[in-house]
Image (tube, helix red, strand yellow):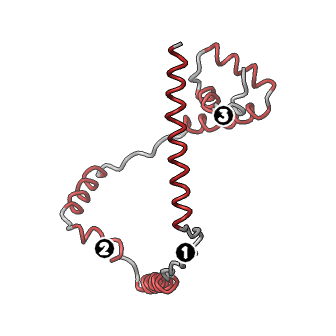
Amino acid sequence: MNCPIKTRNLELLVDFAAGGLNPETASALERHLAGCDACRSMAADQTAVWKALDAWEAPPVSPGFDRRLYRRIDEVARFSWWERLTRAFRRMPLSQAVPLTASAGLLLMAGLLLHRPGRIPPVASRGEVVRANQVERTLDDLELLRQFGTADSKESAHSDAM
């Protein structure tokens, strides 16, 4: 069996600890665990987690829980969107609101002062100056190459016919 940690197949160790593997895979993994300290340690940790989860019991729900929950949902549903948005800030004491507001203002000012749209530097001309006689010679050379191209195609067509 390949090492689950080296192959990044950690789900195999979690399933082993949860008791969710088929017998063949579980026995192969047990043989691997006998020789691999890292996998054995992780499997032991996962087994401890599963045992703790099995032993945990949820506390009983209070008798009026559902009634209170639905009443609160109805109360909040009647608020406007603005009241829902500002509701968390209404309970904030002034001793917390002032520093929070001052900090937000300072951050806003710092952002405005530090944000300077940069000027775009002028682009240096890297192109070469092309003269009219250079363009004329280039066009002549292209015309000459075209003539060679048509002559070659006629000769190749003629040689194939023989």
For mark 2, does the 10 Å Cα neighbourhood hold few (<14), some (14 to 19), or many (20 or more) residues? few
Q: Which residue is mark 3?
A: 8
Relative placement, left or right, of 12 versus 59 is right
Q: Is residue 113 visible?
A: yes
Who is closer to the viewer here, 136 or 83? 136
Q: Is residue 95 visible?
A: no
Please report the residue visible at 27 percent of the width from the left and 56 percent of the height from the top. Answer: 68
Total number of numbered labels? 3
For mark 3, does the 10 Å Cα neighbourhood hold few (<14), some (14 to 19), or many (20 or more) residues? few
Q: How far, Cα to Cα, is label 1 from label 2?
A: 51 Å
Q: Which residue is mark 1?
A: 123
Please report the residue visible at 79 percent of the width from the left and 29 percent of the height from the top. Answer: 36
Residue 86 marker: 2
Who is closer to the viewer here, 76 or 83? 83
Among the two numbered marks 1 and 2 on one chain, the one whose residue lies closer to the N terminus: 2
Among the two numbered marks 3 and 1 on one chain, the one whose residue lies closer to the N terminus: 3
